[in-house]
């Protein structure tokens, strides 16, 4: 597990999270009173599809995979949640069971914020309500971008966009960029709506074109500008 094994300072962590950064100390204390920590080992399931949502989660460190299994038994990754990101708010508000399962891709520390605490704050604090709405709107915007990506962009373009996003370099960078893939290639392929074989083929094509070099999960983007304009 993570080297931080002692009891964490929940109010201090909550204050650093974007969703709670503007709350007063009193409000932070209220949220903290309705918050519990949850440590997960790599591969541990946080909740299953169909479980009741009694609040929402925030990732302090680690990565969480949200996914479901198709009727054919194939796994489809919906999202990969990283540090300082939250998930489960929409299901909590809808009072419905989880439509996906959540599994730790790495050792992880999460905070679970109780729904009763959230609802009480929403009733009393309009700024908190606006932040919750902003967070949900951002998630919806990302979902629309995903649908657009799957519908209008080619497989190669999806992979290129993912690599540039992971590199935090964008299309304006001209020097080599280092990319450490956040999880296995199989999970990334599912997230990009590709088969693992297609992802491997695209990595091979980009390597043959002199745009990237691949060493396990470590990828060097040799020509970011060229990569951003490569292929159909």
Image (spheres, rainbow, N blue to C red):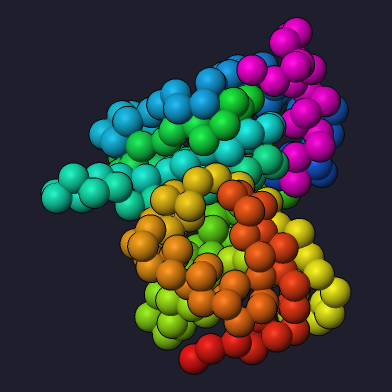
In front of the other: 123 or 145: 145
Identify the magenta region. Answer: 1-18
| Farthest residue, direction front | 208
In front of the other: 178 or 9: 178
Could you say where residue 136 lies in the image, as x and y percent from the top left?
55, 55
In front of the other: 158 or 61: 158
Could you say where residue 119 lies in the image, as x and y percent from the top left?
54, 35
In front of the other: 146 or 42: 42
Looking at the image, residue 48 sits to the left or right of residue 161; the answer is left
| Farthest residue, direction left | 71
**Quarter assignment of residue 81:** top right
Q: What residue is shown at x 66% (from left), y 83% (from top)?
A: 228
Could you say where residue 120 lies in the image, as x and y percent from the top left?
58, 31
Looking at the image, residue 74 sits to the left or right of residue 163; the answer is left
Q: Is residue 61 above or below residue 5?
A: below
Quarter placement of the N terminus: top right
Q: What residue is shown at x 41% (from left), y 26% (from top)?
A: 45
Q: Is residue 46 magenta?
A: no
Looking at the image, residue 73 sits to the left or right of residue 223; the answer is left
What is the number of callouts on the image? 0
| Farthest residue, direction top | 6
- Residue 115 visible in the displayed image: no
């Amino acid at each position: 597990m993570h080297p931080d094994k002692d009891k964490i300072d929940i109010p201090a962590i909550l204050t650093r999270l974007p969703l709670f950064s503007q709350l007063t100390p009193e409000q932070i204390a209220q949220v903290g009173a309705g918050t519990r920590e949850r440590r997960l080992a790599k591969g541990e399931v946080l909740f299953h599809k169909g479980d009741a949502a009694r609040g929402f989660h925030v990732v302090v460190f680690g990565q969480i995979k949200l996914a479901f299994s198709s009727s054919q038994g194939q796994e489809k990754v919906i999202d990969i949640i990283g540090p300082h990101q939250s998930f489960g708010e929409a299901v909590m508000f809808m009072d419905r069971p989880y439509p996906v399962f959540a599994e730790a891709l790495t050792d992880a520390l999460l905070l679970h914020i109780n729904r009763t605490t959230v609802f009480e704050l929403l009733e009393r604090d309009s700024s908190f309500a606006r932040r919750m709405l902003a967070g949900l709107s951002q998630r919806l915007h990302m979902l629309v971008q995903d649908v657009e990506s799957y519908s209008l962009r080619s497989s190669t373009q999806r992979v290129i966009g993912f690599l540039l996003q992971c590199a935090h370099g964008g299309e304006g960078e001209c020097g080599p960029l280092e990319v450490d893939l956040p999880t296995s290639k199989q999970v990334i392929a599912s997230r990009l709506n590709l088969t693992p074989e297609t992802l491997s083929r695209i990595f091979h094509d980009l390597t043959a074109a002199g745009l990237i070099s691949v060493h396990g999960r470590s990828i060097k983007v040799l020509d970011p500008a060229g990569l951003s304009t490569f292929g159909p």
